Amino acid sequence: MTRGRPELLEAGDETIDDAVRHADPMVLRGLLYQLTGDEELVDVPLAMTVVGGCREMYRIAERSDVERIRAKAAAFLREYRDSGAGDLPIGPRERLHRSLSLTAGVEVDPRELELWVEELALDPLARGLRWPEGTPPEGTADFSVLVIGAGMGGLNAAALLKQAGIAFTVLEKNSAVGGTWYENRYPGARVDSPSRVYTHVYGVDFPHPYPYCPQEVNEGYFNWVADTFDLRDAIRLHTEVTSIVWDDAEQVWEVTAEDLDGTRTWRANAVISAVGFLSRPNIPKLPGIEQFRGRWCHTARWPADLDLTGARVAVIGTGCTGYQLIPEIVADAEHVYVFQRSPNWIYHAPGYLDPYPDQVTWLDRNLPYLTNFSRFSVSYMQRPQNTLTALLVDPDFADEHAVSAVNKAIRDERMAFLRKKLGSRPDLLEAMTPTAPPMSARPVLVDQDHSILDMLLRDDVTLETRGVRRVTEDAVELPDGTRHEVDVIVLATGFRANDFLWPMEVRGRGGRRIEELWAKDGARAYLGSMLPGFPNFFMVYGPNTNTLSGMQVVDMEELTTRFALESIAGLLEQRRRSVEVTEDAYWRFNGVLDAAEQFMTYMDPRQSNYYQNDFGRSAANNPLDTRLLWNWLRDPAGRRTADAPLEIDETLLDQYDAVHPRFGADLVVE
Ligand code: NAP
């Protein structure tokens, strides 16, 4: 056994006892069971609470059992320390089903075990490619992939292409990697998904000092990915792709980009576009902005030298970004004017802004596999069975403000929080109460005691709901002529979310433009990734991949990337040149999407945001149970499960059977 974990080797018993007191006992229980098989961990009474109107959460009912599990964990850790703290095997694979179920508090459906073991992230390359012979097939050296974007999706594609031995180049418009987390540097920028599930499966041990990490930690993570997988040489920064055109004769993509020296062209067999969809700022045309003598910016282009000390600031836009920014600037600014068109439902999380106690991060580093089981626990809480109901409209539910019993429970909770905060100010309470039901827009996560609501009560913050008529040299003017003199205008007005791939020119077979394909009702894709007539073109975080239940953004990016990589591997192994989805399959999949979308809260007519496009549908969101997507996206070339039929919950069978993402079925290979 190799000796390791110097920090643990140095630790006294009291450090260990103190650390385990900060751990989630359910996580400790499953992890210890996996490592030791201790049957005393099994029969422990649990209590269930419903969180957020629909999520069933289990905890250990008796304090004495919590203490007992913690004592076992401490004893285990002391013994591990005393034995040298070296490599520790995870224990029998057959035990995982029970260990995960003990962590979750309910039995994990055995049909879903592979999915959840992937989420457990024991295998860092669980969502990468594996070659049966261990090396890529002959001909791989003649195949190249061009990846567009070096953010969360592009870096992952690059890392897994590199690991698979497939040649690739990444083109990135910015001067650094990180995508969204490089660009969004406004004060207060931080993730609102739990950081435990905001890394790729290979990033499970990346240190998370916070439950919800701020921008700089997230940006640091993406730099870590670039360094860990040694990707820097393959990434061309300052290189913005302007066009992608399929060459029918040669069966390759011609990719044109602008870099610091001018225009350059690449030819590649496949393109993976990882440009994101919350990427291009939405800059509204504010009449008069050109005469404004102060400074103005969009939140995603925050100037490094913008000092708000003593400034009068207008913030226009109140989505996640606006609500996140405002509490961070009020202390410096002389006055903040908040221009709100529509309020958003606010969800508070105690300690949203706080770092973890040192004991948590110490235990993450020193108790083997704790980060894996913690990640699984957080991820499983979000499983579709636990979260999808919050999004579903119940046609038989009659209520003016809510669309289902669950939705009403969520609304009641949110209203209680609003009343608690703004009860003394009926004017603000009214202004901050959305008319559309909860979950019809992106939920905005805030700190319990340091949120926009607390800020609105300050004398130096003014909420304006009357709109903006124009900007003058020194003020924002309202429709009734009222002027608010300001020094800085911040546009927190979001992104051109429905302009997928914009402003790139994308042309497929026969020169067909992407706009023609999407003319009917906006951007669509097959499984969020593929387009008919655009062979070997794959999107990561493409149309309808914003899942609101079950999978996180990172998961969907990993799954769509796996779909691309498995497709490419299938081509290489079968010595074919191209794969594309049929037009029929594209529409069949979209039919399944459209049918499911009818029951989604986010289609509520009282709502208008990027969840709905100009054609009255969502090009962004995915209404399906994410277990379907996981199954569909896993094996297009039949490399992984050629003989084994996939198993899926019977309630999903109709949807599942309508889509056949396999070479020779929905996918045509040449
Ligand atoms: P957003 O949700 O699209 O909100 C844009 C805001 O600007 C809305 O309040 C909108 O009002 C307003 N607006 C747009 N055009 C306007 C105009 N011409 N005049 C006045 N107001 C205008 O954008 P976002 O807040 O940047 O968030 C976008 C997405 O990024 C989020 O949904 C989330 O997915 C992601 N995000 C995540 C985090 C996080 O992880 N913590 C943080 C920030 C953003 P209406 O609602 O009336 O249209």
Image (cartoon, grey):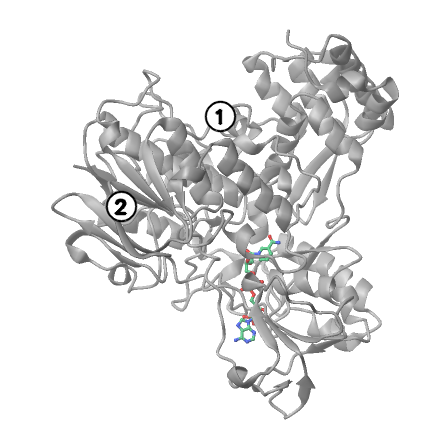
Ligand 1 falls in quadrant: bottom right
Q: Is residue 43 visible?
A: no
Q: Quadrant of the N terminus?
A: top right
Q: Residues within 10 Å of mark 2 (few under 14, many from 20)?
A: many
Q: Which quadrant would residue 204 be assigned to in this image?
A: top right
Inspect the image, locate mark 1, and give the three-letter code of the amino acid beneath it.
Glu
Numbered disc total: 2
Which one is in front, 622 or 49?
622
**Please, is residue 523 above or below residue 79 in the view?**
below
**83 vs 392: above or below:** above
What residue lies at 74% left-to-right and 17% top-to-bottom? 41
Q: Which mark is residue 585?
A: 2
Q: Name the amino acid type tagged 2.
A: Ala
Name the element at disc 1: helix
**Residue drawn at x 17%, y 49% as measured from the top left:** 247
Residue 569 coordinates in the image, percent (x, y): 30, 29
